[in-house]
Image (spheres, grey):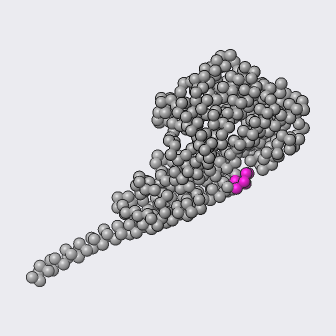
Amino acid sequence: MNTNSTRVRPFFRWLAITCVIVLLPAAAHALWDYVEMRRLATAIDDLRQRGEPVSSAMLTRVRRPSSEEAMRAARYYNAGAALAFRDWVKTYPVANLPRDQAIERGRQVIVSIAKTRAIAPGALDALRTLADEYADALQMVDRAADLPFTGFPPYFFEDNGRVFSLEDLTVPASARTFVELASGNGAEAAESLYRSIRLRRALTRSVPWIGLPLLDLQMLVENTDVPAEGLAKLQSAFAEAERPDAVQQAVRENRANMIQAVWARLYGKGADANTPAGNIRVSWDPWNLSRPWIAREVRLGLAVQQQVLEAAERPWPEKLSELARLAPHLAPEPPVAPKPGVDVRWFNDSFPWVYARDVAPAEARKLALTRAAGVVLAMARYRQEHGALPEGLDRLVPEYLSEVPQDPFTGRGLLYVADASRFVVYSTGDDATDDGGAVGQLAPGWPRHGAKDTGIEIRLR
């Protein structure tokens, strides 16, 4: 009996030691997982309590229509996108996207117009065909032009199809403007451009949307006579199209989408980042050993993104310098793009870099060009009434401008040069140095080759 006991005891001792070795790390991991989940949930709770969006659904609710008229505008934009949709265009991967041939031909024609600043007969035929092909879709979005629009309602079907369709529709919209220009219909061309600018309210992505309407504007002012009321209407449309808060909006959208994607990845597809921390019940997952580490990295990333947001909320041009300060070790080359899925280290390590070196300067250029467009229209109104250009932009205040618009790169007023053949309204651009209005050739996209300043050149007739 005693002999058997002595044989059994070592076995139980070995079993107990094995259980401790196995269960203690598992218990420690479970505790770490619980602690990091609660910390992340609390950090997300703090954002929600401050009114910050923490999911794509919350972003959509923030942009929902604020009135019945805004709802009608959303329906018109949705209908226009549906009519413009091309099944064969929406094929993935995007790198192999076979775009609608008519749209692509239209883009190429507009590029040729930007180079020559003239509409050749063959180009005009192609543009007229394109405008006619998309006439039904343009008619829908035109109905929304004079209505208020704050966004699409949460239950509307938002997908890449609608986004691409509305972006594609800007090309036929410009084609229509050029057709009116070639026909000498200044008033109709100005109205077409107005509706084209208003269409861009429905573009939900941050795109270099300003290129096409600026080319349309340049051709309009240089080649036709537009009634004063048409010029004033266009000026108001460009003023309403300004997006001075685009950088902070982009930070909020990126953060909300990242929170939703990571939360679903960590805690299941049905997990909802909108659930208050006190109501969350998450079971331990022994097969997901990296979950607590990822949760910790996301929580730290939220702190980084909050710093970027606070910098982005500063006025221009202070936000540019503050964002640059947050990224003191900027590399000469862009950081590696995030991997498919959710690369949380990218948000932590590269987030300030991307906004300091890419997003904020791009948005500043768009804002400068939009403001320059308003000044160009004010100049056209002044010249129409006085028969000559003003000596300086201050002469446009207060009759044609409430004030000289601010250059987002310097915080000072936009600049202006003129001679017998042209005038240029411009910003100093990224280097904050006045290069005398060297704005380069206006193109329907980015970048402008050879441009030192950012602005619009108008040739005088």
Q: Nearer the viewer, residue 138 or 175?
A: 138
**In this image, 395 relative to 287: left or right?**
right
Name the residue: 82% across, 45% down: 402
In the picture, the quarter occupied by the N terminus is bottom left
The answer to whether 334 appears left or right of 197 in the picture is left
Q: Residue furthest top?
A: 121
Q: State the extent of the magenta-drawn residues as a range.
A: 314-319
Residue 441 in view in this figure: no
**In which quadrant is the C terminus drawn?**
top right
* Res 9 visible: yes
Question: Where's residue 399, x and y in %?
Answer: 86, 41
Q: In the rendered image, which quarter is residue 234 located in? A: top right
Q: Is residue 101 above or below residue 8?
A: above
How many marks do you count on the picture?
0
Residue at 53% x, 56% y is 54
Query: x and y percent of residue 141 in the render?
Result: 61, 34
Nearer-the-camera pick, 282 or 145: 145
The residue closer to the viewer here, 460 or 54, is 54
What residue appears at the point 82 percent right and 46 percent down from the top-left corner?
403
Seen in the picture, residue 18 relative to 247 is either above or below; the reply is below
Q: Is residue 159 magenta?
A: no
Residue 375, percent across and down? 79, 39
Q: Tell me if 244 is positioned left or right of 100 in this view.
A: right
Q: Is residue 37 above or below residue 330?
A: below
* Residue shown at the point (82%, 42%) measured from the top left: 401
Q: Main secondary structure of the magenta part?
A: loop
